[in-house]
Amino acid sequence: MRPSAALVFAALLSLASAGRAQMPGKIDLEAAEAAAPLMGARVFASDGQEVGAVTDVLFDDTGRAIRLRINAAIRLGLGTRRVEIPPGAFSVSGSTVVLELPADAVNALPEFADASEDNK
């Protein structure tokens, strides 16, 4: 194959794959429907203390919730901070989330920094 024909072929392949790519900002409706009942759900630590409310749910390829982001109260009740609950550290019971972590461990989690907020 001549070099110019190879370049044309490569360009056509890249355009074909770009046409199949998901549009930026496109919402996965199935994930949104699955997350809706959990949004704002009360979150309780393993010791029974309420530690926050769900703000975001991340799913794996099978549609199973694998990570939660919650607004957790800051010590002394002076506002909230957003933290991410790791995989396997929570279970959903109706409209409530129960963590496998005590309240002290939730308080020790680092604050979640959204990369999109850094670009603003």
Image (tube, rainbow, N blue to C red):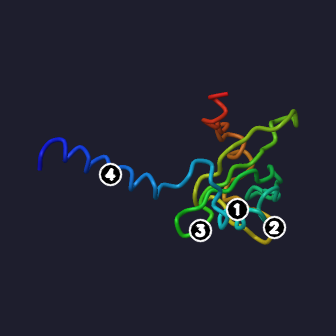
Comparing 39 with 67, the one in front is 39
Q: Quadrant of residue 111?
A: top right
How many residues crowd mark 4 within 10 Å: few (<14), some (14–19), many (20+)?
Answer: few
| Residue 63, label in figure | 3
Amino acid type at circle 1 is Ala
Comparing 21 with 64, the one in front is 21
Cα–Cα span, label 2 and label 1: 16 Å
Q: Secondary structure at mark 1?
A: helix
Q: Secondary structure at mark 3?
A: loop
The residue to which callout 2 is attached is: 95
| Residue 32, label in figure | 1
Amino acid type at circle 4 is Leu
How many residues crowd mark 3 within 10 Å: few (<14), some (14–19), many (20+)?
Answer: few
Seen at 80% across and 64% down, the residue is: 96
Q: Tell how many labels.
A: 4
Cα–Cα span, label 4 and label 2: 49 Å
Cα–Cα span, label 4 and label 3: 34 Å
Q: Quadrant of residue 80?
A: top right
Cα–Cα span, label 4 and label 1: 34 Å
Seen at 66% across and 61% down, the residue is: 90
Task: Estimate the x, y position of residue 112 in percent, counting from the top left.
Answer: 65, 39
Seen at 23% across and 43% down, the residue is: 7
Comparing 63 with 84, the one in front is 63
The residue to which callout 4 is attached is: 12
Task: Estimate the x, y position of residue 24 in percent, counting from the top left.
Answer: 58, 48
Give whichever of discs 4 and 3 has the lower sequence position.
Answer: 4
Cα–Cα span, label 3 and label 2: 18 Å
Give whichever of discs 4 and 1 has the lower sequence position.
Answer: 4
> Furthest-left residue in view?
1
